[in-house]
Image: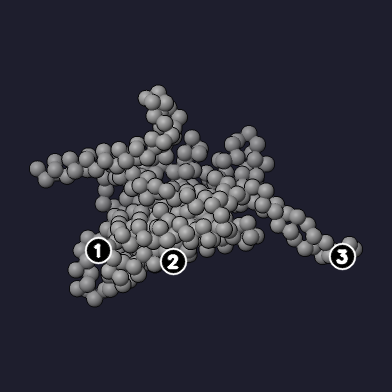
Amino acid sequence: MISILIEGLIFGIMVLGVFMSYRVLNFCDMTVDGAFPMGACIFGACFVAGINPYLALLLAFIGGMLAGLCTTLIYTKLKIPDLLSGILMMTILYSISLRIAGKANISFHNVKKIITVSDPVNGISTVTQELRTPFQQISDFFAAKFPALPSELGILIVLLIFVILLKFLMDLFYHTDLGLTMGALGDNQQMIISQGVNPQIVRGIGICIGDGLAAIAGAFFAMYSGFADVGSGTGVIVSGLASLMLGEFIIHSNKISLQTLRVLIGSIIYRGLMYLARSYGFLIHLKADDLKLITGVLIIICLIISKVGKKKNER
């Protein structure tokens, strides 16, 4: 149960980015599939190099934003359709992630750093120190202070606080002039142009933020998994859309605070459904390889229900 909530919150960060691109900006951004593993690889490469892990998280976010900027430039300057722009950038980011990581997989276990220590008695000596990711540090602290409780509970608490703060900041952003302009841009671009606003800049900012969130979610997932993998982004955008639609199916509202809330709820529910499919799918002859099939069917069902609901409202 704890692992479902943790994964739901981690991927919920990514789905907040998908929400900004697909729902607010009405932009089909496939870059997420490349930004997610790139964020993991940036964090992994920085961590094993001994760089401060919190700085590594910031660098992962910046890397995701730069990926979004490249997608925007391909879309606006080269006049390539949004879907194809995202696919091109997603493909490019796979090679970039491999370059950053240096290999397909980076493990965070038994990562050691040699530290030089100066002592007035013994002189200069070297000490080997094991590096721990923030999630590992939280687990160690929680296990030491509360041995009767699962160590993952500490990760869940910290992650929950982070996601709540992020949601609060996103809600505030959507109420600013820039956030309101983004919402209007997704609904009616001509109206924004008539107001003298450059839609390319506004759209670019939104795409950069969305891909930045996907990258930092990838870094968090790498920390939780204990390794960074260049293939971890496969199908992330599809699961993000499924989570988005599940949330919309559960909560119907035009209020932005409820829309961001349903994004997170949808992500947790989706992870719960995937857990049930992995654990009990054998009862109906489902295999682990069928998870993508289940995701696709979920999206189709949500789309059908949405269309039926719209037809009823029109009547």
Give the total of numbered labels: 3
Lateral position of residue 158 relative to residue 69, left or right: right
Mark sitting earlier along the chain (1/3): 3
Q: Which residue is mark 1?
A: 184
Relative height, residue 143 to residue 71 (above, below): above
* Amino acid type shown at disc 1: Ala
Other residues around mark 1 within 10 Å, as few (<14) / some (14–19) / many (≥20)? some
Is residue 127 depicted above or below 8 in this figure? Answer: below
The figure's colour scheme reads: one colour
Q: Quadrant of the C terminus?
A: top left
Distance of mark 1 from mark 3, alpha carbons?
66 Å
Q: Residues within 10 Å of mark 3 (few under 14, many from 20)?
A: few
- Residue 78 visible here: yes
- Between circles 1 and 3, the one closer to the viewer is 3
Q: Amino acid at mark 3?
A: Gly
* Outermost residue to the right: 121
The residue labelled by disc 2 is 66
Q: Which residue is mark 3?
A: 123
Q: Secondary structure at mark 2?
A: helix
Comparing marks 1 and 2, which lies closer to the viewer? Answer: 2
Which amino acid is tagged 2?
A: Leu
Residue 69 position in % (x across, y down):
39, 67
**Residue 241: percent from the left, percent from the top?**
33, 48
The Cα–Cα distance between marks 3 and 2, rounded to whole angstroms, is: 46 Å
Which residue is at 24% across, 43% downward? Answer: 303
Asked whether 184 or 87 is in front, the reply is: 87
Which residue appears farthest toward the top when viewing the image? 283
